[in-house]
Image (cartoon, rainbow, N blue to C red):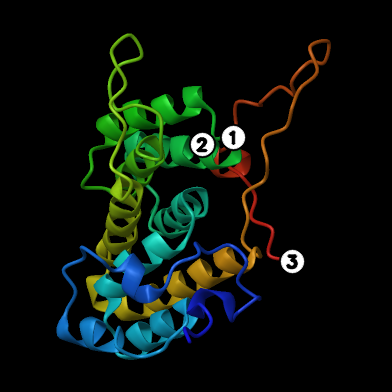
């Protein structure tokens, strides 16, 4: 008789897809350690924990980007990319991250397409650019609105998220990448737990006036706020 699905054993992680590690890793070019662990009866959290403990960080990033639902995965990328934004980061890179954050707060078609424009300006070799591309790849069409629909491959968002996380780990001080990766995966688990969430976009009534933004207000002050409670 088939045993219980490993993904259903840890109710403390409600924001995970309902698949096993082996199912999620199909098609991934994993290293020997990651492939060997797939033969064990591990939950998603346990599989991630084993990869992190053995410092198989790129494989762990590729795996967790698939374990999270797309919106949560992009938000995880945003958290990691935000931590890599040093003073003096070029504006296009910040704008791409903000576009990805905006899509997480309100995953509308307009925000999805805005994310792609921002990603192209920042380029895919940056954490923010990858995060924004991951948002664009979450659904809809890859083609312009006036052309026939070209749906993205289902794993494209995970690809962009993993790229964003890995770039954020080595963007600066690459010698500290292991400790940054471990912090990133702690954040990734918090996203799965529902403790690290975006703030939903506020709905403004037609007669209401939006709060004015002062000239000195920074982008960091206006980005979605994480709820760690």
Q: Position of residue 171 (x, y in %)?
A: 27, 60
Tag 1 and tag 2, C-beta contact below 8 Å: yes
Mark toward the viewer: 3 or 1: 1
Query: Could you tell me which residue is drawn at 56 percent across and 63 percent down?
Result: 191
Tag 3 and tag 1, C-beta contact below 8 Å: no
Query: Could you tell me which residue is drawn at 40 percent across and 40 percent down?
Result: 138
Q: Position of residue 18 (x, y in %)?
A: 50, 65
User: Which of pointers 2 and 3 lies earlier in the amino acid sequence?
Assistant: 2
The residue indicated by pointer 3 is: 229
Marks 3 and 1, how far apart at CA: 21 Å
Taking the view exactly as shown, the residue that stands out farthest to the right is 207
Which mark, by number, is residue 106? 1
The residue indicated by pointer 2 is: 103
User: Which of pointers 3 and 1 lies earlier in the amino acid sequence?
Assistant: 1
Which mark, by number, is residue 183? none
The vertical placement of 75 against 181, above or below, is above
Marks 1 and 2, how far apart at CA: 5 Å
């Amino acid at each position: 008789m088939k045993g219980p699905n490993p993904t259903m054993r840890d109710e403390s992680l409600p924001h995970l897809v309902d698949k096993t590690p082996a199912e999620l890793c199909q098609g991934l070019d994993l290293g020997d350690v990651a492939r060997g662990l797939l033969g064990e009866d591990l939950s998603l959290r346990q599989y991630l924990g084993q990869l992190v403990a053995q410092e198989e960080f790129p494989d762990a990033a590729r795996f967790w980007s698939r374990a999270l639902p797309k919106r949560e995965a992009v938000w995880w990328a945003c958290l990691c990319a935000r931590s890599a934004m040093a003073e003096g980061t070029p504006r296009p890179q910040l704008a791409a991250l903000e576009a990805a954050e905006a899509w997480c707060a309100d995953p509308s078609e307009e925000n999805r397409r805005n994310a792609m424009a921002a990603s192209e300006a920042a380029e895919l070799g940056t954490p923010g650019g990858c995060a924004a591309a991951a948002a664009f790849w979450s659904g809809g069409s890859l083609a312009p609105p006036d052309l026939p629909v070209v749906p993205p491959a289902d794993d494209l968002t995970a690809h962009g998220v993993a790229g964003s996380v890995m770039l954020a780990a080595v963007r600066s001080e690459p010698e500290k990448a292991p400790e940054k990766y471990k912090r990133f995966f702690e954040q990734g688990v918090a996203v799965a737990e529902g403790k690290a969430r975006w703030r939903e976009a506020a709905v403004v009534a037609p007669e209401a006036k939006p709060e004015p933004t002062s000239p000195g207000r920074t982008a960091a002050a206006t980005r979605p706020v994480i709820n760690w409670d």
